[in-house]
Each structure stands twice: as C-alpha cells, then as structure tokens.
C-alpha cells in the first residue's frame, strides 16, 4: 500500500486484488502518467480516505483530493457502487472523475454505475498486454487530456 501521502494525490486506486493493483500501478508508472498513487484495498478504506474519517481523520479533503479515482466494484466491506454513490452525492467530491475498472461485465453493474454518475466503465482485459494498454489509455486521457473543473 502506498501510504506516504503525497501533497497532491493524483490517482486513488481502490482495488482489492493485489495482482491487478500491482499491474495498474506498474502501467501508470511505466508510461509516466503519475507519481502520486494511493492504493486502498477496500471500499471502507476508500470512504475513510475520501471523506477524511478513521485513520485519515487527521487530513483535510483538500489535502487528499485525488485528480482521478480508479474504482473496482467487487470489494469487501463496501462495494464500489456504494463508494461511487457516496462520491456523487457529496458536493465536495461529485466532480472528481471516477473510472470503474472491474472484471464485471454484468449489465446491472454497468447500468447502475452510469446511473450513479461514473465517468467511464472499463472491463479489465484478461491478457497482460491488453491490460497494460487499457491502463495507459485511461491514464493518458484522464491525467493529460481531460480538463477538470476548478475545485
């Protein structure tokens, strides 16, 4: 886990599968798309981090506001759809770009994610090269091309 909290979190990666998290971080770093990644392993940690509760209560939301959130859906404690809903219903976080990066192709998951306001829904490719390319393209778009609103 990347717990040395940088002054500006660029990407918050919420992923319970360590292999997928490692591959995602590897791809983002390989293509120089970010230096400041925070990886959290479940929805509860994500909620605590985003809303400065629990072990993150000593921080402010301004200190920790990520430029983008990569969010898995199928996680322990609190699932990704619940995290997404909390992000989108809070005025302080509703404009943070959220990209679902998941293995779920289930139609109800896709529909619900878009109903809740996800910016993009991407099914994780199974093959290594395709996975690396998908993460590269996500990072290129959201970190370099996208123009977010002022906070």
Image (spheres, grey):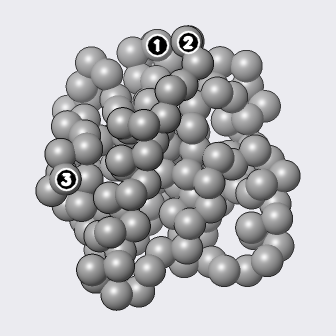
Between circles 3 and 2, the one closer to the viewer is: 3
Residue 13 in sight in this render: no
Q: Mark 2 and mark 1 in contact (Cβ < 8 Å)? A: yes
Up/down of 82 relative to 109, above or below:
above
For label 1, the residue is 62
Residue 140 visible to an observer of this rendering = yes
Q: Write down the residue under mark 3.
A: 31
**On screen, residue 76 above or below 107:** above
- Of the residues tagged 1 and 3, which is closer to the observer? 3
Q: Earlier in the sequence, mark 3 or mark 2?
A: 3
Residue beneath label 2, please? 151
Q: Quadrant of the C terminus?
A: top right
In the figure, 79 relative to 74: above or below? above
Between circles 1 and 2, the one closer to the viewer is 2
Which percent across, then down, holds residue 135?
36, 61
In this rendering, would 70 be left or right of 4? right
CA–CA distance in space, label 3 to label 2? 27 Å
32 on left or right of 108: left
At x 64% / y 47%, what residue is drawn?
119
The residue that appears at 34% across and 87% down in the rendered structure is 127
Q: Position of residue 140 (x, y in %)?
A: 36, 47
Q: Secondary structure at mark 2?
A: loop
Give the Cα distance between marks 1 and 2. Answer: 9 Å
Could you tell me which secondary element the residue under label 3 belongs to?
loop
């Amino acid at each position: 886990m990347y717990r040395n909290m940088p002054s500006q979190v660029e990407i918050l990666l919420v992923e319970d599968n360590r292999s997928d998290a490692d591959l995602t971080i590897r791809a983002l770093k390989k293509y120089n798309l970010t230096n400041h990644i925070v990886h959290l392993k479940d929805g509860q940690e994500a909620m605590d981090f985003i809303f400065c509760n629990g072990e993150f209560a000593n921080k402010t939301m301004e200190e920790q506001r990520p430029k983008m959130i990569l969010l898995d859906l199928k996680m322990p404690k609190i699932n990704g759809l619940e995290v997404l809903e909390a992000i989108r219903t809070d005025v302080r976080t509703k404009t943070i770009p959220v990209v679902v990066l998941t293995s779920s192709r289930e139609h109800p998951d896709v529909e619900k994610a878009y109903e809740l306001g996800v910016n993009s829904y991407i099914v994780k490719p199974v093959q290594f090269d395709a996975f690396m390319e998908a993460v590269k393209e996500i990072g290129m778009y959201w970190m370099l091309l996208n123009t977010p609103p002022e906070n």
